[in-house]
């Protein structure tokens, strides 16, 4: 069971890294425990390969992916399952070859070294992402809706991956005080409900709207986003008032 636990954990972490998802070790541990327990029970009862075996294996993978990913859609869960089982299959073949060449004891050392390597890569990746997220890049932005506009300072947040759930359009966030200079209220026909996750608050809802244009001045470049989606935040986004808006990471790609 310990071997299954280590392998499941390493494969889940590698899957999250390939999908550019944040690695939460607590979630990965819970998902790995579930996978190891399920595999052990299937081994104890002597379940043979067949329809029931495949259904249980796929169901276990789906639950593990939903547990391991903090922010996910059904598409991402299915893609994660494909990545996960492909990696498990590839590693099992590699492990068989190493056992044949080096023997059981040495192949066990290879497994431990592989898991430690994956954990180290995940840790270095998280450190890199945190440092990258702390970089402050501020742009001048114009928000235009219904013939009215307001110009604000906007922070490009590399950690903002907020998406509108139905259209999958990127979502930027503006302070409510700045938004009222464009429109006092959100228009019902363009109204959006945007779910989000944040530290200290597992689930939340932001009110938003589809606007006519979002214009970003990035040096000599003028980037125009038509029918952009803006979420309105009740409060201040910046403690020093240096910006009033947070741009989605994908808008300047």
Image: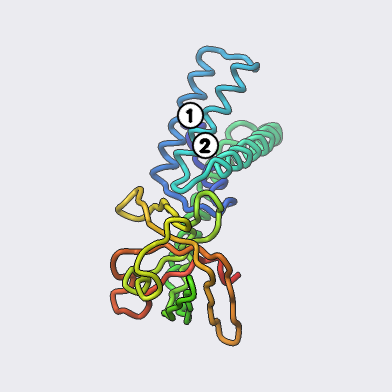
Residue 50: % across, % down = 65, 16
* Residue 165 against residue 183 in the figure, above or below: above
Of residues 170 and 91, the one nearer the viewer is: 170
Q: Quadrant of the C terminus?
A: bottom right
Q: Is residue 165 left or right of residue 87?
A: left
Q: Secondary structure at mark 2?
A: helix
As drawn, the label of residue 8 is 2
Visible residue check, residue 132: no
Figure quadrant of residue 240? bottom left
Location of mark 1 (residue): 36
Of residues 127 and 62, the one nearer the viewer is: 62
* Residue 201 against residue 138 in the figure, above or below: above
Of residues 28 and 58, the one nearer the viewer is: 58
Hey, which residue is sitting farthest top in the picture? 45
Nearer the N terminus, badge 2 or badge 1?
A: 2
Q: Name the residue rendered at 54%, 71% in the picture.
A: 213
Q: Name the residue rendered at 46%, 65% in the picture.
A: 172
10 Å crowding of disc 2: few (<14), some (14-19), many (20+): many
Visible residue check, residue 35: yes
Residue 163: % across, % down = 50, 56
Residue 204: % across, % down = 35, 51
- The CA span between labels 2 and 1 is 7 Å
Q: Secondary structure at mark 1?
A: helix
* Residue 75 against residue 244 in the figure, above or below: above
For the residues labelled 2 and 1, say whether their Cβ atoms are less than 8 Å apart: yes
10 Å crowding of disc 1: few (<14), some (14-19), many (20+): many
């Amino acid at each position: 069971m310990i071997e299954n636990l280590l392998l499941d954990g390493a494969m889940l972490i590698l899957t999250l890294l390939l999908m550019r998802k944040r690695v939460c070790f607590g979630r990965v541990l819970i998902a790995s425990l579930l996978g190891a327990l399920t595999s052990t029970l299937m081994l104890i009862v002597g379940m043979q390969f067949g329809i029931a075996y495949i259904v249980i294996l796929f169901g276990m993978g789906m639950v593990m992916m939903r547990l391991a990913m903090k922010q996910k859609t059904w598409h991402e869960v299915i893609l994660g399952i494909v990545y996960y089982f492909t990696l498990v299959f590839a590693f099992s073949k590699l492990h068989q070859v190493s056992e044949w060449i080096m023997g059981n004891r040495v192949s066990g050392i290879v497994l431990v070294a592989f898991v430690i390597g994956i954990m180290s890569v995940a840790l270095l990746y998280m450190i890199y992402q945190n440092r990258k997220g702390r970089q402050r890049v501020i742009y001048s932005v114009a928000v235009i809706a219904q013939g009215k506009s307001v110009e604000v300072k906007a922070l490009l947040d590399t950690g903002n991956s907020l998406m509108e759930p139905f259209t999958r359009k990127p979502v930027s966030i503006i302070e409510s005080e700045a938004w009222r200079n464009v429109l006092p209220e959100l228009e019902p026909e363009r109204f959006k409900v945007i779910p989000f996750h944040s530290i200290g608050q597992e689930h939340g809802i932001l009110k938003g709207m589809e606007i006519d244009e979002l214009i970003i001045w990035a040096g000599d470049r003028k980037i125009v986003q038509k029918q952009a989606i803006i979420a309105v935040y009740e409060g201040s986004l910046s403690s020093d008032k240096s910006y009033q808006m947070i741009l989605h990471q994908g808008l300047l790609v």
